[in-house]
C-alpha cells in the first residue's frame, strides 16, 4: 500500500551533512571483484516520486518466517513491541526531513519501516548523527541502522549486516552534453571533472590519470568545490564537463531538475564491488530475521517499488546477504 503526502524541503544545509557521510563510507576500496563493467543506469521510472514535494511510502505485512525467526532468536528490542531504527537526515533520495515534518523520508527510512513491519513490530525511527550511530547500536539504544552504511571488514567485527543496495558512483554531465559515455580512463582524457577531495571517487580518477599519463594522453583536470551548489552551477554553466560522486544523490538531482544526465556508473569500491546494508549489534540474533524480511520484499516486488519511487533501480540487488564481504581494513 502506498501513502502519498505533500511535502517540501530545504536542502542547502543538509548537503553539508552528506559530504561527511560520503567521505566516511567511500574513501576506501573493497576486497572482492565487481561483477562486470558497469553500464549506465536505466533512466528513472516514470512512477513514484518526481520531486521532494510528493512522497511515496511503501508498506508491507508481517512475514511469518521472519516473525518466527525473530521469536526464536532471543533478540529483545530496545523498546518492547517496537523496532528502534537509527536513520539519518541528509539529502534526497536517501534520507531527509521534509519541510514541516519531524521525521525523515527517503529510501533508507522506508527500508527501515518495511523491515519493522515485516518483523511484526512497530517502526520507531530516531534521527541520529553519523558519528553517533556506532555506539548507539553497540549499546542497544538503537536496534538497527538503515542510513546508507557501507559494509566494511572492520565494522563486521562489531556489527552484523544484511545487504539491501549496491554502493555505486556515477558520472553526470549536462543534459545537452555531447559526452555519452564515461566508463574507463580513456573516456576522461582532457575533461574537467568535479570530485570530492579525499574520497574513493577521487582515487579512481587519480588512478585513471596515471593510466592516461602512461599512455601519453592528456589527464583529466580534477575540480574541487567546498560548496555543493557551486559545483552544480559549474556543471550547469559549462565551466566543467562532468561531476563524479555517489550515484544516489546525483540520480535524484537529475530526475528532479532535468539539468543533468548519467553517462557512466561504477562500483563504489572500484575496481571491486561494495554493499549498503542494515546493521545491528554483533551476535544479538536480529540480523537473520532482517535478511528474511528483505528477501521477502525482493521476492514480492515491494523492494523494487521503493527503488523505483526514488529513481534508484540501478542500485538494486537480487538477494539480501548476511555479512557479505566488506571493505578491507585501512
Image: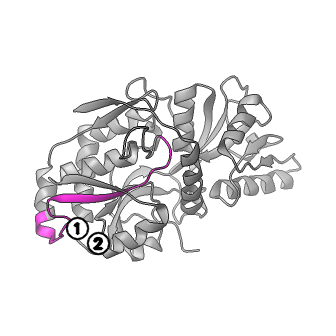
Secondary structure under badge 1?
loop
Which corner quadrant of the image does residue 151 belong to?
bottom left
Residue 255 location in percent, x, y?
52, 29
Which corner quadrant of the image does residue 288 belong to?
bottom left
Residue 36 location in percent, x, y?
53, 48
**Left or right side of 241 for 57:** left
Q: Are marks 1 and 2 in contact (CB under 8 Å)?
A: yes
Q: Is residue 75 magenta?
A: yes
**Front residue of this view, candidates 200 and 124:** 124
Magenta region, residue range: 71-92
Q: Quadrant of the N terminus?
A: top left
Q: Quadrant of the C terminus?
A: bottom right
Residue 329 location in percent, x, y?
54, 74
> Mark 1 highlights which residue?
78
Q: Is residue 256 magenta?
A: no
Q: Is residue 287 above or below residue 184?
A: below
**Left or right side of 294 for 179:** right
> Mark 2 highlights which residue?
140
**Left or right side of 93 for 27:** right
Q: Earlier in the sequence, mark 1 or mark 2?
A: 1
Q: Residue at x 37, y 41 (%)?
A: 101
Secondary structure under badge 2?
loop
Q: Is residue 182 above or below residue 18?
A: above
Q: Residue at x 30, y 36 (%)?
A: 57
Disc ID at residue 302: none
Label 1 and label 2: CA atoms lie apart by 6 Å
**Front residue of this view, candidates 146 and 52:** 52
Q: Is residue 179 above or below residue 169?
A: above
Amino acid at each position: 500500500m502506498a501513502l502519498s503526502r505533500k511535502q517540501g524541503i530545504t536542502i542547502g544545509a543538509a548537503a553539508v551533512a552528506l559530504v561527511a557521510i560520503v567521505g566516511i563510507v567511500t574513501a576506501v576500496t573493497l576486497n572482492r571483484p565487481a561483477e562486470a563493467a558497469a553500464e549506465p543506469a536505466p533512466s528513472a521510472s516514470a512512477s513514484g516520486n518526481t520531486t521532494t514535494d510528493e512522497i511515496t511510502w511503501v508498506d508491507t505485512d508481517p512475514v511469518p518466517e521472519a516473525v518466527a525467526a525473530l521469536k526464536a532468536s532471543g533478540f529483545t528490542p530496545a523498546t518492547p513491541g517496537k523496532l528502534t531504527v537509527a536513520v539519518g537526515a541528509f539529502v534526497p533520495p536517501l534520507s531527509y526531513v521534509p519541510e514541516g515534518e519531524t521525521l525523515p523520508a527517503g529510501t533508507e527510512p522506508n527500508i527501515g519501516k518495511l523491515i519493522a513491519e515485516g518483523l511484526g513490530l512497530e517502526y520507531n525511527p530516531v534521527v541520529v548523527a553519523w558519528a553517533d550511530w556506532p555506539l548507539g547500536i553497540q549499546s542497544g539504544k538503537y536496534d538497527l541502522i538503515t542510513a546508507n552504511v557501507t559494509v566494511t571488514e572492520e565494522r563486521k567485527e562489531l556489527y552484523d549486516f544484511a545487504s539491501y543496495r549496491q554502493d555505486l558512483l556515477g558520472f553526470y554531465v549536462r543534459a545537452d552534453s555531447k559526452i555519452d559515455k564515461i566508463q574507463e580512463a580513456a573516456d576522461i582524457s582532457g575533461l574537467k571533472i568535479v570530485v570530492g577531495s579525499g574520497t574513493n571517487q577521487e582515487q579512481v580518477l587519480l588512478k585513471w590519470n596515471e593510466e592516461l599519463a602512461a599512455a601519453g594522453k592528456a589527464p583529466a583536470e580534477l575540480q574541487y568545490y567546498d560548496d555543493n551548489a557551486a559545483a552544480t552551477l559549474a556543471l550547469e554553466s559549462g565551466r566543467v564537463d562532468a561531476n563524479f560522486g555517489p550515484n544516489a544523490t546525483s540520480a535524484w538531482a537529475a530526475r528532479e531538475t532535468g539539468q543533468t544526465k548519467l553517462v557512466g556508473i561504477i562500483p563504489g569500491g572500484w575496481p571491486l564491488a561494495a554493499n549498503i546494508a542494515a546493521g545491528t549489534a554483533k551476535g544479538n540474533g536480529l540480523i537473520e530475521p532482517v535478511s528474511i524480511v528483505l528477501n521477502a520484499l525482493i521476492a514480492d516486488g515491494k523492494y523494487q517499488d521503493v527503488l523505483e519511487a526514488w529513481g534508484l533501480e540501478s542500485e538494486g540487488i537480487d538477494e539480501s546477504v548476511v555479512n557479505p564481504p566488506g571493505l578491507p581494513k585501512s
